[in-house]
Amino acid sequence: MKNTLFTLAMFSLAAALALSTAGCKEDTVSVPPGFTVSSVTASVAPGGDIVITITGGTSPYSMTSGPDTAVATADLVNGTLTIHGVTGGFTTLKVGDAAAATATITIVVTGAVTADLFPLVFGHKYTYGGYAIAPSTGTIFPDPSNRYQTVWTVGPAGPFPGSTVIIDSTRLVHPLLGEILVARNLVILKNNLTGEFFFLQTLGPFFRAFGINRMDTVRSIPIAKPEVGIGGTWVAFDSTYVDSTASSIRLQIFGEVEDGEVITDSTATHSSHETIRFRTWRRITLNGTVVVDNATTSKLWLQKDFGPVQILISEDTENVGHFRIVKDWNF
């Protein structure tokens, strides 16, 4: 009798283990593979299409946000996402599955960007946080109390036809001078047909660094040229000078539309902005030998119908540099 009971018990235990093992195996098989997209970037010409495939996860799939339909449109059928280019620019879209898995896809539409990337509306005010950068060394000024702040106010018409004044008021903590307020007027010229704009800049630090005796230091430099499209380049400045020793010194400034980029601002809500990133850089040649190359002079992250979300103004031999990210605006 005992042997019979023991045999029945062992049989029951074996059956339970078999059922348990079978159950685990069945659960493992039923778990869907991970949610994936074939690419998280897309580049397409206006009028063209590109297809991205969605697999895994839990169907059905859906588009949960975007894109900006003035730049690109999108159509999702089962796991096939077709993106259609409309006009030059940058936008994003987000896709997801029924289990809340998501993926963000960045879209570049090649060709001229015709959207207004910096509306010069009188009275518009941008407030930026960020930091100051020491001349020549590139080191960041310490700012433990987070006092750095810049306000850009779009001011009155400038001194030249088509120009506008931007009033720049910057508070920073200088290692030697303490907290200081620097106020200056910037002059911007904008081509309202193409969106290209120029800043009046001084070449004084360059002339003095290389011993070039020039009094006419102000130049109009195109620092954003949307019409060349993302990936496009331009020559912003190219001139050769002779110093007191008869050496030939050539200064070239080049511009490029580097890419589209999503920037998270420094507001309390940390909002996201779809921007296009512009960069200018310089090359200096002394008697035929390049002595400075690929040195960034500025970067601008511009959002359609908004303006500068993020700004980098590089330091030089005499002037403080600035990195700025928007934290408030009045429109």
Image (cartoon, rainbow, N blue to C red):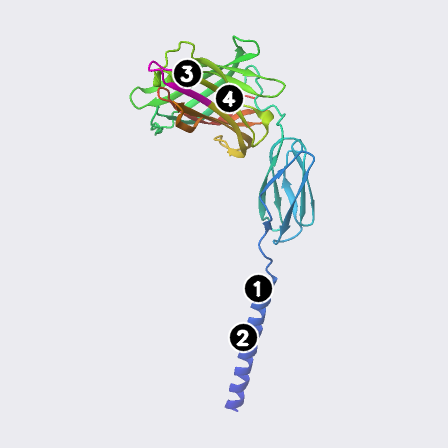
Task: Identify residue for label 3.
Answer: 241
Instruction: Note whether 63 is above or below 20 in the view shown.
Output: above
Residue 258 visible in the displayed image: yes
Q: CA distance from mark 4 to mark 3?
A: 17 Å
Q: Nearer the viewer, mark 4 or mark 3?
A: 3
Q: Earlier in the sequence, mark 1 or mark 4?
A: 1
SS under mark 2: helix
Residue at mark 2 to residue at mark 4: CA–CA distance: 76 Å
* Along the viewing direction, whichever of 134 and 7 lies nearer the viewer: 134
Amino acid type shown at disc 3: Tyr
Q: Which mark is residue 236?
A: 4
Relative depth, front residue between 284 and 65: 284
Please check the rendered image and state whether residue 248 is part of the magenta-colored stretch, yes or no: yes
Quote the CA–CA distance across marks 3 and 2. Answer: 88 Å
- Which residue is labeled 2 in the image? 17
Return the mark for residue 28: 1
Answer whether labels 1 and 4 touch (C-beta < 8 Å): no
Depth check, mark 2 against mark 4: the one in front is: 4
Labels 3, 1: front one: 3
Q: Earlier in the sequence, mark 3 or mark 2?
A: 2
Q: Secondary structure at mark 3?
A: strand
Q: Secondary structure at mark 1?
A: helix
Whether 147 is among the magenta residues is: no
Position of 30 compared to 203: left or right? right
Nearer the camera: disc 1 or disc 4: 4
Question: From mark 3 to mark 1, how far is it between C-alphas?
Answer: 74 Å
Q: Amino acid at mark 4?
A: Ala
Of marks 4 and 3, which one's residue comes earlier in the chain? 4
Q: Residues within 10 Å of mark 1 (few under 14, many from 20)?
A: few
Magenta region, residue range: 241-252
> Type of residue at label 2?
Leu
